[in-house]
Image: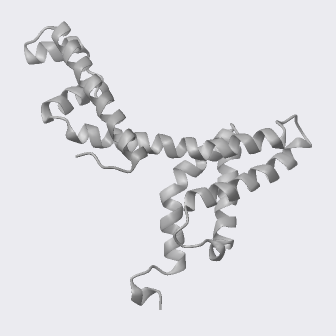
Amino acid sequence: MREQQGELPPDEEFVRLLSGVQRKLFLFVFTLVPNVVEAEEIVQSTSVVLWQKFSQFRKGEDFLRWACGVARNEVLKHRARASRHEATFSNEFMEQLAETTVPLMEAVDERRQALQRCLEELQPHHRRLLAQRYQEGISTEEIAKNQGKTADAVRRMLHRIRLAIYDCVQKKLASMEWGTSTP
């Protein structure tokens, strides 16, 4: 039995996989159909088709890539219905766009992961400074005042931190490309 071997039942596995890619699937569809309401409807119909065809999904394959393939077909169906009412892009153009979108989403995800790791490696006071400036929206002047520094000193520190993060991300991405790991 699958459950005895530590595997989830198919319905739970499906929900886990789909919930893990739901946002990326929406973004993929939204690049092909830049109307939020239509994109949401297509993602819903895609989810139904994914559930219906889940038995065809081969464990170990990239679920997002499979889901995007199904979504592309749903977009084409939607476009065929919509083309009766309005002018649309050619199917060839949409296919090319779909083929380039998935690798771009994967690249963005790799960059986000590298950035997250680099942020975690920062000294705590540098993370606090970034959070104050970019998450809380506190001005450099206000941060400087609170820390007893000049605004120019805070700007220089932020600049050095951003450069360090940039270098760190570049190194992590390079190590991903070559299959090595960075400390």
Query: Could you tell me if residue 14 is visible in this image?
Result: yes
The residue that appears at 13% across and 8% down in the rendered structure is 150
Q: Is residue 26 toward the left or the right of residue 123 in the image?
A: right
The residue that appears at 62% across and 42% down in the rendered structure is 101
**Quadrant of the image occupied by residue 122:** top left
Seen as rendered, the residue at the extreme right is: 84
Q: Is residue 7 toward the left or the right of residue 101 in the image?
A: left
Q: In this view, does 107 lie above or below 7?
A: above
**Which colouring convention does the figure follow?**
one colour
Q: Is residue 120 toward the left or the right of residue 84 in the image?
A: left
Seen as rendered, the residue at the extreme left is: 148
x and y percentages locating residue 51 in the rendered image = 64, 70
The residue that appears at 82% across and 46% down in the rendered structure is 79
x and y percentages locating residue 90 in the rendered image = 84, 38
Q: Is residue 49 toward the left or the right of residue 111 in the image?
A: right
Q: Is residue 6 above or below residue 26?
A: below
Q: How many marks?
A: 0
x and y percentages locating residue 86 in the rendered image = 88, 36
- For the residue pair 123 and 145, the one nearer the viewer reads as 123
Query: Could you tell me if residue 36 is visible in this image?
Result: no
x and y percentages locating residue 73 in the rendered image = 75, 55
**Quadrant of the image occupied by residue 56:** bottom right
The residue that appears at 55% across and 66% down in the rendered structure is 61
Q: In this view, does 20 lie above or below 142?
A: below
